[in-house]
């Protein structure tokens, strides 16, 4: 009789090793393909936002404000009652019924507006975001932030989407004559050379303390050693801006973030306040995927503010997607030159940017 020959232990181990090698070779390719798909969806979201802004501007004659006071009730004392740019764009994002559900005769966080405030708009989320919990739960969050300009020591509110002035607000330190509303003619640096939106990772629901060397550090805000008092704002002080960047980069790895900082990013897409800029905005102070930093005299630490550095951030390897003023989307590397990044943040400061600089 003929006996069957079985696999030896060595042969079995060789087959297992070959399979393991094949899996190790295939996994990066699969992950790369998935990230490419997520990045493409992210680019599409930013293009939709850019198109919505252009549609808004063609109807109204100006860009939307990043935040506009709900003046019918603001005098009653709700300093959070500023409607965001996302609310203004709802009709242009095929969200007309959601916009119509808003009642602007009451506070935006009133129970009459919970249908809209608690709704998560898919276009406002990047598919590469790894956190699913809402930092301002139950309010809907967002991964895309409007650019409100470059470093405030040079000149504040130089972005395309900036707050509308409201002089009756006792905290209106952000009113400097450079606020909304304006149209394409005011973007003298060119819409293709000025950022309008970027990605920004959302904050942590727990508002837990985060250290500088933590992987979640870019989701929070830290206090730099350099102060930015109101007396130096709009002073054209580039050296002070550079000094602040250096101080932010030199924060020790063991330093803990500012109290109340880790849940500010993307806190709510519907409403905020100009002093709470981490909620729905960012600026061109620190380069992408670096720390967000505030200053020692900040009256509202943890929420960005008028003068702080509120950085763009993403989970895409190597940089962030940025929606430009002309509606195009560019991938900006983390290694972008600081001066170029500053120039991309301003609409009217006359910087010259080479076409291959970013």
Image (cartoon, rainbow, N blue to C red):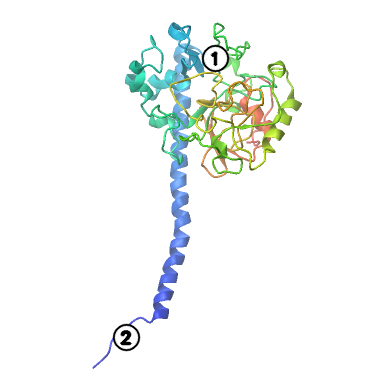
* 297, 154: nearer the viewer: 297
Q: Which mark is residue 5?
A: 2
Residue closest to the far right: 239
Q: Quadrant of residue 236?
A: top right
Which residue is located at x 58 percent, y 12 percent?
Answer: 172
x 54%, y 20%: residue: 161
Q: Spatial distance from mark 2 to mark 1, Cα to Cα?
A: 81 Å
Q: Is residue 71 left or right of residue 151?
A: left
Q: Residue at x 44, y 64 (%)?
A: 22
Q: What quarter of the picture does the C terminus occupy?
A: top right
Say whether residue 213 is visible: yes
Contact (Cβ within 8 Å) of mark 2 with mark 1: no
Looking at the rendered structure, the secondary structure element under dot 2 is loop
- For the point 48% across and 6% down, which residue is it? 75
What is the crowding at mark 2: few (fewer than 14 residues within 10 Å), some, or many (at least 20)? few
Q: Which residue is mark 1?
A: 183
State whether residue 99 is above or below residue 141.
above
Residue 276 location, quadrant: top right
Say how many tags the image has. Answer: 2
Q: Quadrant of residue 291?
A: top right
Q: Position of residue 115 (x, y in %)?
A: 33, 22
């Amino acid at each position: 009789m003929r006996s069957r020959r079985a696999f030896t232990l060595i042969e079995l181990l060789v087959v297992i090793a070959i399979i393991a090698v094949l899996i190790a070779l295939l996994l990066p390719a699969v992950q790369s393909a998935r990230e490419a798909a997520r990045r493409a969806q992210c680019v599409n979201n930013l293009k939709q936002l850019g198109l919505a802004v252009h549609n808004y501007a063609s109807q109204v004659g100006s860009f939307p404000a990043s935040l506009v006071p709900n003046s019918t009730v603001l005098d009653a004392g709700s300093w959070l009652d500023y409607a965001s740019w996302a609310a203004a764009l709802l009709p242009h994002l095929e969200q007309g019924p959601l916009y119509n559900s808003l009642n602007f005769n009451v506070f935006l966080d009133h129970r009459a507006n919970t249908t809209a405030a608690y709704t998560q708009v898919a276009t406002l989320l990047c598919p590469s975001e790894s956190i699913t919990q809402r930092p301002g739960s139950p309010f809907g969050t967002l991964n895309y932030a409007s650019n409100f300009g470059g470093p405030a020591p040079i000149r504040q509110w130089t972005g395309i989407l900036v707050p509308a002035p409201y002089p009756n607000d006792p905290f209106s330190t952000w009113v400097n004559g450079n606020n909304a509303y304006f149209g394409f003619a005011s973007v003298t640096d060119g819409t293709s050379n000025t950022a309008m939106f970027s990605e920004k990772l959302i904050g942590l629901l727990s508002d837990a303390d985060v250290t500088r060397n933590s992987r979640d550090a870019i989701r929070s805000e830290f206090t730099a050693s350099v102060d930015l008092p109101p007396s130096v704002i709009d002073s054209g002080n580039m050296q002070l801006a550079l000094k602040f960047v250096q101080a932010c980069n030199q924060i020790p790895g063991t330093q803990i973030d500012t109290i109340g900082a880790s849940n500010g990013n993307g806190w709510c897409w519907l409403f905020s306040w100009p002093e709470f800029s981490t909620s729905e905005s960012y600026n061109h102070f620190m380069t992408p995927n670096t720390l967000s930093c505030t200053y020692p005299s900040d009256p509202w630490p943890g929420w960005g503010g008028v003068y702080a550095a509120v950085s763009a951030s993403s989970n895409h390897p190597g940089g962030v997607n940025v929606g430009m003023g002309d509606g195009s989307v560019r991938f900006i590397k983390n290694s972008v030159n600081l001066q170029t990044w500053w120039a991309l943040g301003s609409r009217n400061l006359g910087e010259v940017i080479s076409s291959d600089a970013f």
